[in-house]
Image: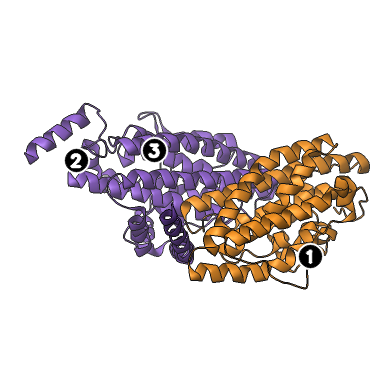
Chain colours: A purple, B orange
C-alpha cells in the first residue's frame, strides 16, 4: 500500500498536479517543506532587523515611508509563509521555538550589518534580487499553499528590487561621499549575496531529492550564475564595480566567469559566527519574551469574553 | 532653517500638526520588527506609516506657504530635517519614550482620540487644503483609534499583570495629556471656539474606553505643557539627532 501511495504521489508531481494539505505525502517531503518554508518565513522576519536599523535615520520622509512599507511587506511575507507551513501540521509557536533555540535556520545574509544608508539600496537590489531568482521558480513548486504564497511574495519582491536599485542610482549620481557609500555597500554585500544560493551543487545534500519532488526547479549553481549575469550588466548603469577581479564575460559559455567564493565564510556564518548572528537572535528572543505578557493578556481577554457570548 | 519667528497662525498650526504626526510616527516605527505578535508588528508599522504620510501632507502645505512668504525654497524635508528642537511644536506626549507595549498603545489611544475629534473639526475648515488633508487623515485615524482602544481594553481587562502594567503606564503618561486639549492662540485662530467641543468629546471618549478597560482616570494635579510652543522634554533632542543625522552630516545632497 505504501509503495502505491508513493508512486501515485510521484505521478502527480510528474504531471505537475499540485500537492494540497490533505493529500497523502511522504514524511520526508513534509519535513523538507516544513524546514524550507519555515526557514524562509524566519528569514523574512529576521530580515526586518537589518533594514529596521535605518528607519529612524532615513534621509528623507519619502525614503522613510518607502523603507517602512518595505519592511511591513516583509512581515506580511513572513505571515503568509508561516501560514503555508502551518498547513503541514506545525504551529507558528513551534516554529518560533525552533528559531529561538537555534534549531531552525534563517538566511545567513541577515547576519551582516547595515553600516550606511546605501546598505538599504544594496539590500533591495542585491539581496532581494538574489531572493527573487530563488523564489520565482517556487511559484511553480509542487506544494500548492507554498506556490500560492510565493506568487504574492514575488510580486512585492520585484518591486523592492527596483526601489533598491533606484535608491542606489540616486547615490551613484550624488556627491563623492554618496558614491563612496554606494560602492562600499556593493563591495560588502556582493559576496554574501552569491552565498545566498547555497553551497555548490556537488556539496548540496538536499538538491537531488528536492528536484525530483519539484520543490526546487533549478540547482544552486544555475541560479547563482543567472544572478551574476544579471547584476554584472545592471551595475554598468550605476557606474560602480563589483569587487571581483576575475569577473569577465566568457564568449564561449556566453556567461560571466567569476571568482572563487569563500565557502569557509558561509560555514562560519551558518555556525553562528557571522558579524550579527548574536544581535539578530537576541533581538528576536527579546521581542518574543517581552511580548509574552501581552499575548497572555490577549488570550485571557479573549477567553473571558468568549464565555460571555 | 528656523520657523521660530513665524507669526502666521495657519503655518504654525500646520507645523504643529505635522510635528505631532512625525514624532509619534517616529516613536511607533521604533517597534517595527520588535512587536509582541507579527500581526501587531504589522499593524503598528502601518500606523507609523500613516503618520509619516500625514506629516508629509502637512509639511508640504506649510512648505508651500513658507516659501511663498520668505522666497526661500523650503521643502517637507527641510522642515523635518533642518529645524532644531525649539522649532518643533509637537505635544510632549508624542515624544515620550515608548516604554512597554501597554504604554505605547495607551499613548497612541490618547492621541488618536484627540486627533479623531480635532480632524472632524478641521474637515469643515474653510482652508481647502487643510480640510482635504483632514478628510484623508481621518479615515486612517478612525482605524488608529479603534485599534488602540481595543488594546487598552484588552490589557486592562486581560491578566492581573497586564492590568498593573497599563495602570503604571497611565500614571506616567496622564500628566502629558492636558496639553493635547490646552489650545494655543494659533490653534484657536484657525478652529475658533469649536475647541471646547474637542476637549469635551475627548474626555468623554477616554472615559468610556478606560471604564471598559476597568481603569479610572488618574487624579493628577500637575500637567506638563510647552511642546506646542517649542519647549520640550529631553527626549526630543535625541529623536532629532538620530532622525536628522544624514541630512546634517551630508548637507545639500539628494537622497
| Residue that carries the numbered disc 3 in the rendered image | A149
- Alpha carbon separation for disc pair 2 and 3: 20 Å
Asked if residue B81 shows in the view, the reply is no
- Classify mark 1: residues with Cα within 10 Å, few (<14), some (14-19) or many (20+): many
Q: Position of residue A35 (x, y in %)?
A: 29, 50
Q: Secondary structure at mark 1?
A: loop
Q: Residues within 10 Å of mark 2 (few under 14, many from 20)?
A: some
Image location (x, y in percent) of residue A156: 49, 37
Asked if residue A308 can be seen in this view, the reply is: yes
Q: Residue furthest top?
A: A15
The image quarter containing residue A95 is bottom left
Residue contact between numbered discs 2 and 3, judged by CB atoms under 8 Å: no
**Which SS class for mark 3?**
helix
Q: How many marks?
A: 3
Q: Name the chain under label 1.
A: B
To which residue does mark 2 refer? A25
State which tag comes first along the sequence, 2 or 3. 2
Mark 2 belongs to which subunit?
A
Seen at 68% across and 70% down, the residue is B218
In the picture as drawn, the residue positioned furthest to the left comes out as A1
Instruction: List x then y, in percent, for residue A83.
Output: 37, 45
Q: Nearer the viewer, residue A197 or B202?
A: B202
Q: Which residue is mark 1?
A: B232
SS for dot 2? loop
Q: Is residue B72 left or right of residue A169?
A: right
Q: Are marks 2 and 3 on the same chain?
A: yes
Chain letter of the residue beneath label 3 in the structure image: A
Amino acid at each position: 500500500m505504501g509503495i502505491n501511495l508513493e508512486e501515485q504521489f510521484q505521478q502527480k508531481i510528474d504531471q505537475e498536479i499540485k500537492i494540497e494539505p490533505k493529500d497523502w505525502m511522504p514524511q520526508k517531503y513534509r519535513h523538507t517543506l516544513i524546514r524550507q518554508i519555515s526557514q524562509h518565513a524566519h528569514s523574512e522576519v529576521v530580515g526586518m532587523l537589518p533594514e529596521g536599523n535605518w528607519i529612524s535615520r532615513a534621509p528623507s520622509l519619502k525614503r522613510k515611508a518607502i523603507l517602512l512599507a518595505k519592511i511591513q511587506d516583509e512581515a506580511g511575507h513572513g505571515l503568509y509563509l508561516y501560514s503555508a507551513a502551518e498547513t503541514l501540521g506545525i504551529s507558528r509557536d513551534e516554529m518560533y521555538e525552533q528559531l529561538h533555540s537555534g534549531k531552525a535556520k534563517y538566511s545567513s545574509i541577515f547576519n551582516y550589518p547595515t553600516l550606511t544608508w546605501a546598505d538599504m539600496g544594496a539590500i533591495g537590489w542585491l539581496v532581494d534580487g538574489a531572493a527573487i531568482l530563488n523564489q520565482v521558480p517556487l511559484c511553480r513548486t509542487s506544494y500548492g499553499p507554498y506556490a500560492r504564497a510565493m506568487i504574492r511574495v514575488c510580486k512585492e519582491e520585484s518591486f523592492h528590487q527596483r526601489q533598491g536599485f533606484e535608491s542606489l542610482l540616486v547615490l551613484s549620481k550624488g556627491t563623492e561621499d554618496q558614491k563612496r557609500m554606494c560602492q562600499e555597500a556593493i563591495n560588502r554585500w556582493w559576496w554574501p549575496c552569491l552565498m545566498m544560493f547555497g553551497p555548490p551543487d556537488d556539496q548540496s545534500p538536499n538538491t537531488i531529492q528536492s528536484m525530483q519532488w519539484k520543490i526546487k526547479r533549478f540547482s544552486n549553481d544555475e541560479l547563482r550564475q543567472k544572478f551574476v549575469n544579471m547584476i554584472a550588466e545592471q551595475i554598468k548603469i550605476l557606474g560602480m564595480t563589483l569587487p571581483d577581479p576575475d569577473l569577465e564575460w566568457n564568449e564561449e559559455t556566453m556567461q560571466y566567469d567569476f571568482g572563487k567564493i569563500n565557502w569557509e565564510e558561509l560555514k562560519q556564518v551558518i555556525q553562528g559566527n557571522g558579524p550579527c548572528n548574536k544581535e539578530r537572535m537576541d533581538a528576536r528572543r527579546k521581542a518574543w519574551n517581552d511580548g509574552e505578557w501581552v499575548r497572555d493578556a490577549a488570550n485571557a481577554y479573549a477567553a473571558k469574553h468568549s464565555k460571555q457570548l | 532653517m528656523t520657523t521660530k519667528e513665524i507669526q502666521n497662525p495657519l503655518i504654525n498650526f500646520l507645523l504643529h500638526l505635522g510635528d505631532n504626526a512625525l514624532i509619534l510616527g517616529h516613536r511607533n516605527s521604533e517597534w517595527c520588527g520588535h512587536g509582541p505578535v507579527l500581526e501587531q508588528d504589522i499593524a503598528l508599522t502601518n500606523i507609523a506609516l500613516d503618520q509619516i504620510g500625514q506629516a508629509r501632507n502637512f509639511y508640504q502645505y506649510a512648505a508651500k506657504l513658507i516659501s511663498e512668504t520668505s522666497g526661500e525654497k523650503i521643502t517637507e524635508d527641510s522642515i523635518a530635517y533642518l529645524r532644531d528642537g525649539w522649532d518643533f511644536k509637537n505635544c510632549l506626549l508624542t515624544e515620550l519614550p515608548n516604554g512597554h507595549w501597554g504604554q505605547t498603545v495607551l499613548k497612541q489611544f490618547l492621541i488618536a482620540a484627540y486627533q479623531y475629534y480635532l480632524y472632524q473639526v478641521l474637515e469643515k475648515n474653510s482652508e481647502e487644503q487643510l480640510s482635504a488633508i483632514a478628510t484623508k487623515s481621518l479615515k486612517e485615524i478612525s482605524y488608529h483609534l479603534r485599534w488602540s482602544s481595543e488594546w487598552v481594553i484588552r490589557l486592562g481587562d486581560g491578566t492581573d499583570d497586564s492590568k498593573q502594567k497599563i495602570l503604571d503606564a497611565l500614571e506616567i503618561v496622564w500628566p502629558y495629556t492636558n496639553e493635547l486639549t490646552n489650545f494655543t492662540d494659533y490653534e484657536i485662530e484657525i478652529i475658533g471656539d469649536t475647541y471646547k467641543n474637542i476637549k469635551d468629546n475627548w474626555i468623554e471618549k477616554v472615559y468610556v474606553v478606560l471604564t471598559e478597560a476597568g481603569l479610572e482616570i488618574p487624579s493628577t494635579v500637575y500637567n506638563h505643557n510647552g511642546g506646542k510652543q517649542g519647549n520640550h522634554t529631553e527626549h526630543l533632542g535625541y529623536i532629532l539627532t538620530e532622525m536628522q543625522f544624514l541630512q546634517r552630516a551630508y548637507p545639500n545632497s539628494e537622497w
